[in-house]
Image (tube, rainbow, N blue to C red):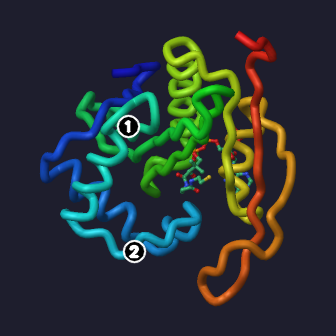
């Protein structure tokens, strides 16, 4: 479990609560569009398989549920965060994050991505982080820019969704240039 302030990242469970939360989030067409995701529709079985695939080996990829605390102290399921180690030898990981609408724009994205980077850097020795985002996704691009990521290029006209082709921005953050 990873925690900072009132936010916690924890592994998902196969409980109805987690599975239906993830299914609802991933079935929202506007969210799927922002996530550059085509895996629609999700149902409890596809989510269950997705959780199990993502959490099989934390040295390859992982999925965290993001929980926050309300002012009254109760726990709120706010979203999920993912990483995928795309090259073990070079120690590079791709990050992903998704918050449900009422949890957006409160700084949770910043905290959740920071927690994942700290964990991956300190525990799995990952030295380079990358993300991809729709060019039009200003919140996501600002979130990563605020953390020191630099945008390195654009795949033009790359993602067909909602009847149009969309550009995708690629960004990177290198924490250590050592070869160790
Ligand atoms: C993208 C996302 C993770 C951002 O998380 P968040 O918690 O809302 O972001 P934060 O509050 O930490 O910070 C977002 C930053 O973007 C800014 N921002 C938000 N909406 C914006 C907009 N429409 N235009 C410009 N900037 C915007 C915020 O002001 C903030 O910057 P600041 O701290 O310098 O003021 C969240 O909105 C989300 O889950 N969206 C749906 C899924 C998605 O797009 N995932 C990312 C795919 S790469």
Residue 147, x across and y down, in percent: 72, 30
- Looking at this view, name the residue that lies furthest to the front: 89
Say which quarter of the image contains residue 74.
top left
Drawn side of residue 42 relative to residue 124, left or right: left
Residue 82 against residue 113 in the figure, above or below: below
Mark 1 nearby-residue class (10 Å; few <14, some 14–19, many ≥20): many
Task: Kindly identify the residue that appears in the image at 42 percent across and 70 percent down.
Answer: 39
**Residue 130 visible here:** yes
**Residue 71 visible here:** no
- Looking at this view, name the residue that lies furthest to the left: 16
Mark 2 nearby-residue class (10 Å; few <14, some 14–19, many ≥20): few
Drawn side of residue 100 relative to residue 47, left or right: right
The residue that disc 2 covers is: 40
**Looking at the image, is mark 1 or mark 2 earlier in the sequence?**
2
21 or 59: nearer the viewer: 59
Residue 51 against residue 38 in the figure, above or below: above
The residue that disc 1 covers is: 64
- Looking at this view, name the residue that lies furthest to the bottom: 163
Drawn side of residue 20 relative to residue 83, left or right: left
Task: Kindly identify the residue that appears in the image at 70 percent across and 28 percent down.
Answer: 128
Residue 60, x across and y down, in percent: 46, 35
């Amino acid at each position: 479990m990873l925690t900072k302030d009132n936010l916690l990242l924890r592994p998902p469970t196969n409980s109805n609560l987690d599975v239906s939360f993830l299914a609802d989030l991933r079935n929202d067409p506007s969210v799927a569009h922002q996530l550059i995701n085509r895996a629609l529709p999700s149902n409890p079985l596809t989510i269950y398989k997705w959780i199990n695939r993502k959490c099989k080996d934390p040295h390859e990829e992982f999925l965290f549920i993001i929980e926050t605390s309300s002012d009254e102290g109760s726990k709120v399921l706010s979203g999920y965060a993912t990483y995928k180690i795309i090259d073990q030898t070079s120690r590079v990981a791709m990050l992903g994050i998704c918050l449900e609408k009422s949890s957006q724009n409160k700084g949770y994205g910043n905290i959740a991505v920071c927690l994942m980077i700290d964990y991956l850097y300190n525990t799995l020795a990952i030295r380079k982080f990358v993300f991809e985002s729709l060019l039009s996704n200003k919140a996501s691009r600002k979130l990563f820019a605020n953390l020191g990521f630099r945008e390195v290029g654009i795949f033009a006209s790359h993602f067909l969704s909602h009847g149009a082709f969309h550009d995708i921005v690629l960004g990177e953050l290198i924490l250590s240039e050592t070869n160790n």
